[in-house]
Image: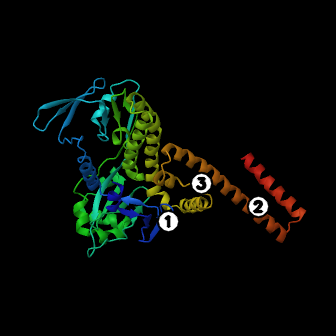
Amino acid sequence: MEEKIISQGIPMHARMIHSPSGKQSPIPYGKTGQYILSVDRANLNKQLLTEAGTYPNANLNFDHKLKDWNAETGMMTFVKPDGTKEEIAVDLIVGCDGAFSAIRKQFLRRSRFDYSQTYIPHGYMELTMPPINGEFAMKPNFLHIWPRNAFMMIALPNLDKTFTCTLFMPFEDFEKVTTGDEVIEFFQKYFPDAIPLIGVDALKRDYFRLPAQAMVSVKCSLYHIGDKCVIMGDAAHAVVPFYGQGMNAGFEDCIVFEELMDQFNEDFSAVLPEYTRVRVPDDHAIADLAMYNYIEMRAHVNSKWFLFRKHVDNFLHFLMPKKIIPLYTMVTFTRTRYHKAVERWHWQNRVINSGLLCCATGAVFGGCYLLMIKYPISSNMLSINVEKIWDRLGALYTL
């Protein structure tokens, strides 16, 4: 289905950073030709369901609420729309039922099951930027970001020529804005170039349409019970949305599981424990990366050091494409395992930072050497200066 999905997605080749003054600066995601896709989630769901429905051995049942299930027998009890119950015996239960998984609840009753969920102190609110004269209001092939250190707004292009703008901000800041005039005042201060694009009336109306929504990160282990049940996707590893890898990680769960099914000849008693062993460190790593990327998107992209390091990383990647690979490239454009990407990123940072420190130290000593050649210092002057420094150090020590 890859071509069908990609044909209905919009390529985004770079982040477009919007400064408070309205200046726009692109930061490419990778090399020329590398991009991420803005895909309509509702359309993707429809495409997947339509494709699944073409298989003669697949039955799609909607509005069935999972009431209970048994990890030993594989018996599942559902409540149908008319209130009646239906029991089904299965060989394998695959729980892909989201961050608040009903399947995972039974895992919590078992010993040696680790589980944690973290709500970040920031919420999100979606706004719509309409087309202008039937065309995109901004350049469409970018992920637009308004980074403001403590919070940010992003905008993703849609096929109908609109942008979905998402404001990420601490809940207490959302609660400070209580009237339409305060909304405009807030946007005038932090996102002035977005006001004419979204519209004053739309901002005043849509800001209060729904309250800010929470974001949760879920980590757990194990991912399986015996040879009867396994959890995947958000049920196993819900992540905050800032790396754009939540859906990709869920799809990769399917790929890894299929590879293990081939490797172990579809023996669930071998496949499920191995699936847990392989996926848990990777999914925990992408959860941490997603948290980190929020700080990068709302704050680090404003830093000259961050932009300098981006250029250094890209230059070294160009010179040594197999030795130095930027973190974002490893995570987004390769099948490098998430936790391996993090390990390599830390190693590369140590090497590059050490190299930059050596270069800076060499430049300082080289500059001093050249100055000494041009302006030689007599031994008397040197001894006087050393004596003065020693006397001052002595005075500081006495204090």
Q: Residue furthest right?
A: 379
Cβ atoms under marks 1 and 2 closer than 8 Å: no
Image location of residue 114, percent across then percent down? 41, 30
Query: CA gap, disc 1 to disc 2?
Result: 38 Å
Q: Is residue 25 visible?
A: yes
First in sequence, mark 1 or 2: give its number.
Answer: 1
- Residue 198, relative to residue 51: is it above or below? below
Q: For the point 90% across and 62% down, which residue is it?
A: 379
Q: Can you tell which mark lies on residue 365?
A: 2
Q: Give the amino acid type for the residue marked by disc 1 in the picture.
A: Thr
Depth check: give the residue in front, 328 or 224: 224
Question: Is disc 3 surrounded by few (<14), some (14 to 19) or many (20+) residues within 10 Å?
Answer: few
First in sequence, mark 3 or 1: give its number.
Answer: 1
Residue tagged 3: 322
Q: For the point 76% across and 51% down, which residue is it?
A: 393
Image location of residue 293, percent across then percent down? 45, 52
Image location of residue 215, percent across then percent down? 34, 47
Cβ atoms under marks 2 and 3 closer than 8 Å: no
